Amino acid sequence: MALDGFRAAVKQGSLTDAISNVQQRTPESFNSHTLHIAVTGESGSGKSSLINAMRGLSAGDEGAAETGMLDTMTEPMAYPDPVLPGVTLWDLPGVGTSSFPLDSYCKQLNLSRFEFYIIVGSQRFRSDHARLACEIQRMGKRFYFVRSKADMDLDASRRQRPSSYNEERILEQIREDCRRGVAAEGVGHPQVFVVSSWEPNRYDFPLLRQTLQTELPLLKRHAFLLSLPAVTSPIINQKKAALKAEIWKIALFSCFLAAVPVPGLSFLGTFVVFRKHLFRYYSNFGVDNRSLSALAQQVGKPVEELTAVMTSLGMTPMTALKLLLDSVGAAVMVREYSWKRLPVFGAMVSGGVALITTYFMLRKCLASVADDTQRVLSKALEAERENTI
Ligand SMILES: Nc1nc2c(ncn2[C@@H]2O[C@H](COP(=O)(O)OP(=O)(O)OP(=O)(O)O)[C@@H](O)[C@H]2O)c(=O)[nH]1
Ligand SMILES: [Mg+2]
């Protein structure tokens, strides 16, 4: 997917243009992107059978995923969806086995590399599912919860209470149990489907396929937005490196200014230089007040939500003033005290302090403005994701 316009806007420090570039993309522009869907869940819950059913295959057919009572799977296996364009279904080992205990499951399988998830459960909603749902939420990603083996539940109910048997009521009870379980993890409107992979024409199986098909362009856009922070990071680092390379020149200027024998000039000069460059960094990266307001408006969020992630705001000129008072103040005292007796020594001390203070403070500022830019962009993209679905 062409990202030149987006990259150029970030490089120029125009975050609003970068977000406009994203907003202007039509759903069709994501068609070429392959959505990687991880089918995960407890061991033996019917993940592989679900993938086979989604691909119109039965266990044992050529190219079908391995199913059975034994958990032998160690590596995720990829299966292209034959109907949905640009969809790869990944059959994952079950969670909570001796090879894949819950605590290390996400890390072992590098779960974050997938873009969308289907959590498959075959019994009551369990804590393993809750943990998986939480982890997926934490990554800013989405999932469907599929409750499999509905045929077994219905069968059991028919045998136990044949007189009061009501298929739709039982299915709704199962859906409700799953929804409650997922919602308890803070997921607003969990999408729950009750299916039987043995009967792909019944229960919620057709709805699952239909929903996936309908939401596909949005899910692909969501995945695209999630991939952007990784694209912006090297651009911001490059900008940071370029600005960092010139800090020593600015520091040298402060040093000369500090050596001039005018009382207070050292302090004032360093402060003015610092203030000028701090504001320059803000506008260079596109996180000055005006740009932030425009960006917030563009993504439909209050500006406070964007500024909340910025740590460099603690480095206002006033705080810098305080810092400078502490560090440069000492040098000024030395210089002013020793000026008459040891003028060269005085000038060297105040110049040296101004050089070191300016150099390290500007480096620190630059690093935090660059980090803030990455965080603000991620926040703006997160807002865009919320606007997507
Ligand atoms: N009755 C019924 N049995 C099912 C259904 N789906 C899967 N099974 C059975 O459940 C068992 C496990 O199914 P798999 O698809 O291998 O489950 P899995 O989640 O891939 O298992 P692991 O990969 O070992 O974690 C198999 O014996 C399947 O035949 C279903 O919808 N209904
Ligand atoms: Mg399997």
Image (cartoon, rainbow, N blue to C red):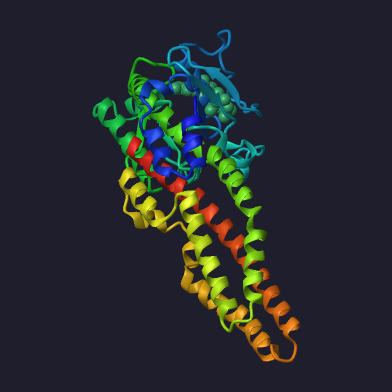
Q: Position of residue 68 (x, y in %)?
A: 58, 21
In the rendered image, the vertical position of residue 214 relative to residue 376, given as above or below = above
Is residue 388 left or right of 15 when viewed as pictured? left
The number of numbered discs placed on residues in the rendered structure image is 0
Name the one closer to the observer, 226 or 261.
Answer: 261
The answer to whether residue 56 is seen in the rendering is yes
Q: Residue at image x 62%, y 61%?
A: 250
The answer to whether residue 122 is seen in the rendering is no
Name the one closer to the observer, 127 or 297.
Answer: 297
Name the one closer to the observer, 160 or 185.
Answer: 185
Q: Residue at image x 51%, y 48%?
A: 374
Q: Residue at image x 38%, y 48%?
A: 186
Q: Position of residue 148 (x, y in %)?
A: 43, 27
Name the one closer to the observer, 384 or 156.
Answer: 384
Q: Residue furthest top?
A: 62
Figure quadrant, ligand 2 = top right
Q: Residue at image x 41%, y 57%?
A: 307
Image quadrant occupied by the C terminus: top left
Q: Position of residue 39 (x, y in %)?
A: 51, 28
Is residue 246 left or right of 212 when viewed as pictured? right
Q: Position of residue 351 (x, y in %)?
A: 68, 74
